[in-house]
């Protein structure tokens, strides 16, 4: 029997698309090569957050216990148990997605999906057997995977990607990380917290280079204070896998030399995972081209999420899933494209942003005002022992509309949602000023930064 929709990929784009279509009464199948939840739940967003929680807890107990009135005679940790906890968290959530498939009547198919025609999907199972199914519509949501450094291919031991970094059997004594984006800095924090000697090399001028320049500079200062060696504005010029360790040659404004480490984590970005068969037209970077309704160059075939290119974010994929499916099956639905997507990095201190950076506004010649408040001016931050960091809000000078928000500090990834709503609804400095933020909360940093943009900050 033909399906109304077959989704290839069961990550945060694919499983959301499949469940939403089933809720609309459609006959749906979801094809997933690994396990429900995709990279995000199994090898990305979720297990790394479990590891980050362990790292933050151990760092607090080992470095700040006295500050909070605690003392320990022999604080220890078990590396295998830490890794095991993160895998249990992933397994639990992946099982939850499988339950939701069953609850909503989505047929869950394990195997590699290939687009063999405008309405046909071929599935290759783990044992090599093949089967085909017909569908009125097909959504490709196959995501992306770690990009390798050509001279230094992954070997799972001394040269690894993010997937291997989550399950290393033995904690390395030293690690060099190439790339200071979200993946690189999150693992830098995790491994450093447990005592691994970590060096981060970034070719661009600042850490987390897509973020506002001040944010990247602040993160580098915090990381350096924590003992992480940060080499921003440095280029990797040579690599060597020596079998039991790696050697990375860098050159840059601060240093030229060879860095030796037990393990090299390559975190230079991702590349799309394309379905088999006859893929649609691709961009020059290898991602699938899509139109305003997420349609590809193949009739009745759509694509969402990381496989279509930046922004490479799980929540963006889920947003696109709902828009694509509702555009297909809900009469009169006006498909929306992503306008303002929050970026979140979960190291400590956390980094979060939405909208324009100050750098971008200057390049575009937009006149703006800045409201910036340190966390040390916020009572809840002091009480929680988290005074480091700041919130920086950018408002248009002419109309007072919010243009961008950038936060570094405790709970930054939770605070950014309000700013996303403000951007989407085109709220102004006066409207945010007039919104009461409960006291004492970390969210007061938003209100205070808004006052600062007007030159009326009360607590700083």
Image: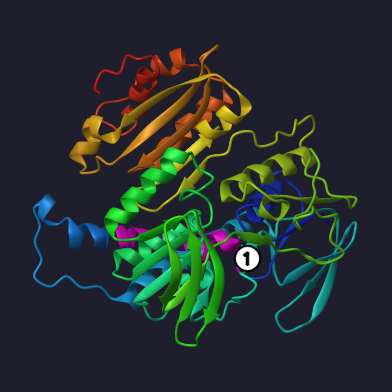
Closer-to-camera residue (236/274): 236
Residue density around tag 1, few if under 14, some if 14–19, many if 20 or more, within 10 Å: some
Picture coordinates of residue 342, whole percent (x, y): 53, 40
Asked if residue 145 is among those painted magenta in the image, a careful observer would answer no
Is 302 situated left or right of 11 in this image? right
Q: Residue at x 54, y 70 (%)?
A: 161
The residue closer to the viewer here, 440 or 412, is 412
| Magenta span | 35-56
Residue 31 vertical position relative to residue 377 in the rendered view, above or below: below
User: x, y (%) of residue 223?
Assistant: 34, 54
| Dominant SS type (magenta) | helix
228 lies left or right of 266: left
Colour scheme of the picture: rainbow
Q: Nearer the viewer, residue 154 or 318?
A: 154
* Circle 1 residue: 147
The question of residue 39 being in magenta is answered with: yes
Q: Quadrant of the C terminus?
A: top left
């Amino acid at each position: 029997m033909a399906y109304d929709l077959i989704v290839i990929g069961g990550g945060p784009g694919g499983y959301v698309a499949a469940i939403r279509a089933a809720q609309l009464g459609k006959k749906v199948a979801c094809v997933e090569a690994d396990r429900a939840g995709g990279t995000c739940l199994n090898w990305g967003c979720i297990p790394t957050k479990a590891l980050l929680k362990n790292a933050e807890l151990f760092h607090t107990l080992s470095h700040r216990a006295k500050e909070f009135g605690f003392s320990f005679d022999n604080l220890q940790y078990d590396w295998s148990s830490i890794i095991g906890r993160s895998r249990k968290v992933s397994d639990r959530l992946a099982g939850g997605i499988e339950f939701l498939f069953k609850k909503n009547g989505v047929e869950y198919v394990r195997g590699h999906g290939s687009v063999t025609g405008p309405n046909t999907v071929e599935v290759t199972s783990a044992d090599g057997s093949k089967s085909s199914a017909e569908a009125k519509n097909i959504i490709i949501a196959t995501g992306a995977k770690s990009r390798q450094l050509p001279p230094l291919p992954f070997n799972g031991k001394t040269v690894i990607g993010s997937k291997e970094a989550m399950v290393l059997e033995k904690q390395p004594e030293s690690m060099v990380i190439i790339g200071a984006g979200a993946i690189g800095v999150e693992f830098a924090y995790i491994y450093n917290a447990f005592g691994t000697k970590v060096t981060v090399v970034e070719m661009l001028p600042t850490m987390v280079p897509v973020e506002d320049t001040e944010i990247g500079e602040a993160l580098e200062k915090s990381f350096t204070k924590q003992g992480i060696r940060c080499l921003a504005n440095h280029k990797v010029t040579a690599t060597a896998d020596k079998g039991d360790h790696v050697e990375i040659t860098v050159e840059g404004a601060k240093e030229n030399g060879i860095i030796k480490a037990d393990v090299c984590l390559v975190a230079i970005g991702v590349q799309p995972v394309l379905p088999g068969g006859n893929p649609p037209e691709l961009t020059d970077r290898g991602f699938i081209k899509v139109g305003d309704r997420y349609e590809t160059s193949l009739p009745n075939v759509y694509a969402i999420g990381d496989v279509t290119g930046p922004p490479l974010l799980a929540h963006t994929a889920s947003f696109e899933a709902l828009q694509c499916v509702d555009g297909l099956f809900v009469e009169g639905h006006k498909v929306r494209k992503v306008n303002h997507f929050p970026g979140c990095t979960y190291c400590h201190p956390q980094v979060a942003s939405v909208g324009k950076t100050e750098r971008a506004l200057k390049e575009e010649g937009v006149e703006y005002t800045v409201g910036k408040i340190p966390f040390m001016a916020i009572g809840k931050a002091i009480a929680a022992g988290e005074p480091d960091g700041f919130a920086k809000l950018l408002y248009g000078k002419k109309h007072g509309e919010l243009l961008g928000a950038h936060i570094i500090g405790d709970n930054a990834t939770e605070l950014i949602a309000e700013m996303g709503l403000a951007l989407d609804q085109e709220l102004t400095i006066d409207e945010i000023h007039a919104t009461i933020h409960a006291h004492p909360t970390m969210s007061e940093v938003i209100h205070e930064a808004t006052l600062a943009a007007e030159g009326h900050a009360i607590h700083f």
